[in-house]
Each structure stands twice: as structure tokens, then as C-alpha cells.
Image (cartoon, rainbow, N blue to C red):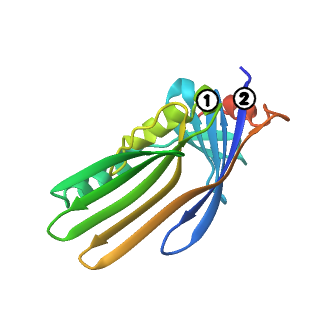
Amino acid sequence: MKSTLLIHVIKEIETPEKTVQIEEFITDLFVYTKQDDNDVFYHKSKNQMYAIDSISQKVSPISLNFREQQAKQLKKMFHQIDVRNEKGTEGRKVFIEGRGNMAVLNGEVKVSTFKGIENTANKEAYDLLSQSSLVNIDIEKNEVTQYVNVDINIQGKRVVNKTTIKNISILDQDINRYDYLLGYPVN
């Protein structure tokens, strides 16, 4: 099979420790995420995330169980987590608030539409990863999370994580450049 569409996304992820830039190459068949030396690959027809070993040209399944367990433990710290949507002229904003005896959660997510993304594996990859998230923000097939800012304060220790799309574009040259990943054997 060959990809029929290629969308390139550049994101910046800011944590208390560092700021990193990642690239995503989104097709109708997969989502390929490049981050330093930690490349991952979502295969739509298998609904599975894989770690890529470019040297051996193999992929290894990624289990989301550990991530799911972390999210469950974190959820237990909050009595309630409220999610509120507000429609705007350029998409919508989602506000997240959680309170517990020793923890406070505040977040803001900006969701916007991007023409063409509805014909890709983006929504399926997002849904798979959302299963192991603290809060699941529903998106439509034609939407992307343009900006995410999450602030968690646990017993006075504050952790702020931000993710921002810096650029998103449809590429019309060499759209099959990463299709070779579909042929990598599973390790």
C-alpha cells in the first residue's frame, strides 16, 4: 500500500526540564513521530504504536499499560475532574479543572480544524493514546490539538507541560517518503 496524503506537523513540547521539538508525518496509513532518537510509528490498520529501530530496520510494539496505570494513579488524587468546552471563531477551547485533598489540576486545550487531516490516521492515533491519558478530550476527524497547557500542583510541587503546534502543512512532494516503515518487520 502507498500513502495518498502526507501532512507535516512541527510541535514544541515544553516541560520543566527542557523544551523539545518533534516532527510528525501523518498519512492515511500511519503517523510517524520523530523526536531526537526516539522515533515512534502508529500503524492504522493494526491500531498499534511501535518503537522504530532504524539500524535493524524493525519495529517493536509499545505497550500503553504502564502509561494507563500512571494515569489511573494520578486520577485517584482528584475528587473530580471537570471538562468545559467553549466554542470560538477559530475553533474551540477546552478547560480542565481538577481538585483533590493534595492536588490541583488546571489545563487549557485549543482545538482547531485543519482541512485534509480528516483523511489521515491522526484521529485513530489520538484515540489510542487518549485511552492512557489523565483526561480524554474528544476531537473530530478534522480537528487537531493546536495548543495544550496542563498545570498540576501536588503538595506544592508544580509541574507545567505545554505542547504547541508551530507549523502544519500538506506536503505535495514525495508523499511516500516514509512508506518503507510499513514494511519493517515486528521485533
Question: Which of these two is toward me, 100 or 108?
Answer: 108
Label 2 near label 1: C-beta < 8 Å? Answer: yes
Horizontal side of residue 181 vs 45, given as left or right: right
Check the picture and name the quadrant holding the C terminus.
top right
Identify the residue at horizontal 39%, vertical 71% (top origin): 159
Q: In the rendered image of this protein, does residue 82 appear above or below residue 162?
A: above
Three-letter amino acid code at the position of disc 2: Leu
Residue 21: percent from left, percent from top: 64, 61
- Residue 187 visible to an observer of this rendering: no
Q: In the rendered image of this protein, does residue 142 appear above or below residue 66?
A: above
Identify the residue at horizontal 48%, vertical 51% (top origin): 110
Quarter-of-image position of residue 11: bottom right
Horizontal side of residue 118 vs 85, given as left or right: right
- Which of the numbered marks, if any, corresponds to residue 120? 1
Identify the residue at horizontal 37%, vertical 67% (top origin): 151
Secondary structure, mark 1, is: loop
Mark 1 surroundings: few (<14), some (14-19) or many (≥20) residues within 10 A: many
Residue 59: percent from left, percent from top: 61, 39
Distance from disc 1 to disc 2, alpha carbons, whole Å, reads: 7 Å
Identify the residue at horizontal 24%, vertical 59% (top origin): 98
Secondary structure, mark 2, is: loop
- Residue 14 visible to an observer of this rendering: yes
Mark 2 surroundings: few (<14), some (14-19) or many (≥20) residues within 10 A: many
- Which of the numbered marks, if any, corresponds to residue 5? 2
Quarter-of-image position of residue 1: top right
Horizontal side of residue 110 vs 2, given as left or right: left
Three-letter amino acid code at the position of disc 1: Thr
Q: Residue furthest front?
A: 89
